[in-house]
Amino acid sequence: MAENSTTTAGISRSEYTRRRERLMAELPAGSLAIVSSAGEQLRSRDTFFPFRQDSDFLYLTGFDEPEALLVLVPGRAQGEALLFCRERDPEKERWDGPRLGPECAVQQCGLSDAFPIGDLDDILPGLLEGRERVYFPMGRYAHLDRRLRNYLERIAMAPGAGRAPEMVDLDYQLREQRLFKSAQEIRLMAQAAKISAEAHCRAMTRCQPGLYEYQLEAALLHTFVDSGAREIAYPTIVGGGRNALVMHYCSNHAPLRDGDMVLVDAGCEYRGYVADITRTYPVNGVFSGPQRALYDIVLAAQQAAIEQVAVGNHWDHPHAASVETITRGLVDLGLMRGDILGLIESGAYQRFYMHRVGHWLGMDVHDVGDYRVHGAWRQLEAGMVMTIEPGIYIPEDDESIPAEFRGIGIRIEDDVALTHKGPQILSAAAPKTIEDIEYTMLHGRDLLTR
């Protein structure tokens, strides 16, 4: 396999090698790092959920099978990367599908060596002997914690044994490394966002009074799978009317009513990377006056936040811009009263806007990476990818609010990669201006009825 060839995950083999070498360079001499694959998850009786690999393990290997363990040994040239995985088994593969096996895994993933997972008890204790520290994701997989403790206890009890290695959590080093996306990663995220944007367009053209929320969900899922993205990034949210006020609503069983808005928060996973897009629009395809007024505020808040996604700004700059825009807009609309600065400092705006403006995005929808460093907001740097998703949620039972505004929930969310040239909106293909949404819904319906 050529050095620049790609694995099944869509990342070049050489990039996986660089990732492992970069991680090993962060670890002290005399240490060892261990990362486990995910396990298969039982759905019911003898049926399992579709397998989804552990993100850290996939990030370092591109190997997409369960029952595997990666061992990184720093300090020998660029270090050694050893994989333990299942052997080939024609009988089991007849039922469950092909396996790479150790030999093919070495070639495909660019590893130093690979061994059958059944040999772990014979090989790993020897690798642990004499180590000062053992890094691994502590507490994530109970079976790995127990296995390592047993190995270390055996080493400590051996005649003439020295001090047992210290067990150290690996999460910090991996969080920092995964926070900064390569060009290959951003291309995959852009494709995930493109597919997801097409799915949102399809849902818009399908939407009309009398449908059920799950029918819009079906339109989204159809586009995901039809485009080669068979997994969702997170449970799809389709909240019509007051259901949009529930942040993580995903029942998706209510009817869509004429005059209501519907909030659709959905994204696919494509080759290990995810998208996260939210659009809100009128069920009947035409914004009413109150809906338009609130939507304009949220859209302006999103634009203000995106403008603050710049190298040198810190993590809170986009959120602060969105808070100021939303607070000012609600005061201008008469839904809040008082001095804008005072309303912000007191947190009074949180009655209508209770979440932050975004989060990191990558292999996980709420991706790894600290938002504060040494107690201060993190400075934004090129290679970071985040969501920008301001919202306004008007309680339906608040009689101090004019009736025509009550029960409306609006959120607009895009995926934004920070480059040296500024913010790149990966999800820009999903319509979000009032004019574009109404045009898409009207003309899309015309096409559906022909």
Image (tube, rainbow, N blue to C red):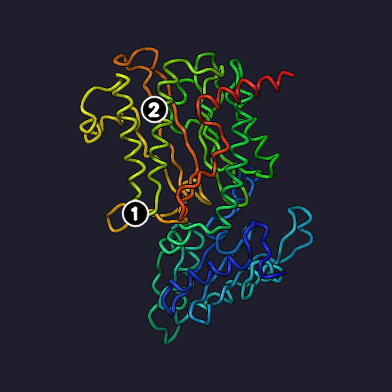
Image quadrant where residue 396 sits: top left
Mark 2 nearby-residue class (10 Å; few <14, some 14–19, many ≥20): many
In this picture, residue 140 sits left or right of residue 397: right
Depth check, mark 1 against mark 2: the one in front is 2
Residue 171 on image: x %, y %: 43, 61
The residue that label 1 is drawn on is 378
The kind of residue on which mark 1 rests is Arg
Q: Mark 2 points at which residue?
A: 297
Q: Which of 164 and 369 is in front in this view?
A: 369
Residue occupying image coordinates x 69% and y 42%: 227
Q: Is residue 246 above or below residue 256?
A: below
Q: How far apart are marks 1 and 2 (CA)?
A: 27 Å
State if disc 2 and disc 1 touch (CB < 8 Å): no
Amino acid on which the number 2 mark rests in the picture: Ile
The location of residue 65, given as percent across then percent down, is 64, 58
Residue 204 sits in quarter: top right
| Extreme residue in the front direction | 421
**Which residue does the image show at 41% across and 64% down from the upper left?**
169
> In the image, what residue occupies the spot 56% across and 22% down?
438
Relative to residue 310, is residue 437 depicted above or below?
Answer: above
**Element under disc 1:** loop
Q: Quadrant of residue 298?
A: top left
Using the image as rendered, state which of residue 336 and residue 124 is in the foreground: 336
Vertical relation: 224 (above or below) 208: below
Mark 2, secondary structure of its residue: helix
Task: Look at the image and tell me in which quarter the N terminus lies.
Answer: bottom right
